Amino acid sequence: MEFADRNGKYYETLAPVVEGLGFSIVELTANARQDGLHISLVIFSKDGVTVKDCERVHKLAAARMEVVGDIRDVYFEVSSPGVNRNIKSAGEFAVFIGRSVKILCDGDSEWIYGDILNADDKNVILELSNKIDNKNKKTEKSIPYSQIRKAKLDFSWEEA
C-alpha cells in the first residue's frame, strides 16, 4: 500500500477548502475528459458526513477550482467513505484513527478486527479486544502495510 498523492496540484488547491469545513480528504481522483475535468472527492469527518456536507464541499470546491485553478468545466462528485469502505492506501489509515477496521493479512484466512490507534508510513497499530474470563482485555498489534491483503472500515463494531 502507498500513501495517496497529497502533493498533487488538485489536492493542494482543494485541501484548504475541505479542511476549512472540518473534513479530511480520503481520496481525490481527477480525470480529464472531452467534456471537461472530472473530480471525485471522498471526504471524512469523525462526526460523520451528511448529504448537506457533501453539497457544501461541492459548492465551495467548484468555486475554488474556478478562481484558483482557472478551470471552468469541472464536474464534481463528493461523497462519504461509506460504512464498509475498502481502505486503499496507507494514508487512509491515518485519516481513520479511532475507527474500527477489519484487516486480512497475506496467508491468513480470518479477518483481524480492531480500532486504529496509530498509523505511519510503514505500519498500522490496532487495539484488539479479546474476551478472556468475561473480561475485556485490550491488546495492541502492529501490522506492516506490506502484509495487508485487504482492509475495510468496520462500523458494525462501533457503538452508536
Image (cartoon, rainbow, N blue to C red):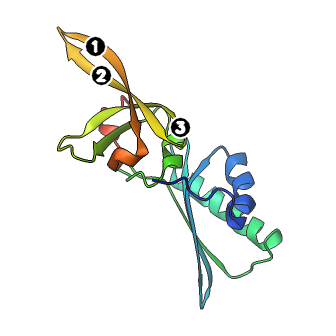
Q: Residues within 10 Å of mark 3 (few under 14, many from 20)?
A: few
Q: Which residue is mark 2?
A: 129
Q: Position of residue 50 (x, y in %)?
A: 51, 50
Residue at horizontal 72%, vertical 66%? Answer: 9
User: Looking at the image, is mark 3 or mark 1 earlier in the sequence?
Assistant: 3
Q: Which residue is mark 1?
A: 136
Viewer-proximal residue among 26 and 121: 121
Viewer-proximal residue among 31 and 7: 7
Viewer-proximal residue among 94 and 40: 94
Do the residues bearing badges 2 and 3 touch, measured as CB atoms within 8 Å? no
Instruction: Examine the rendered structure and indicate whether residue 102 appears above or below residue 84.
Output: above
Residue type beneath disc 1: Asn
Residue at horizontal 56%, vertical 56%? Answer: 4
Viewer-proximal residue among 57 and 120: 120
Secondary structure, mark 2, is strand
Image depth: mark 2 or mark 3 in front: 2
Quarter location, residue 111: top left
Quarter location, residue 33: bottom right
Instruction: Examine the rendered structure and indicate whether residue 8 appears above or below residue 143.
Output: below
Residue at horizontal 54%, vertical 48%? Answer: 91
Q: Relative to 67, is 43 on the left or the right?
A: left
Secondary structure, mark 1, is strand
Do the residues bearing badges 2 and 1 touch, measured as CB atoms within 8 Å? yes
Q: Relative to 133, is 33 on the left or the right?
A: right
Q: Which residue is mark 3?
A: 46
Residue type beneath disc 2: Ser
Mark 2 vs mark 1, CA separation in Å: 6 Å
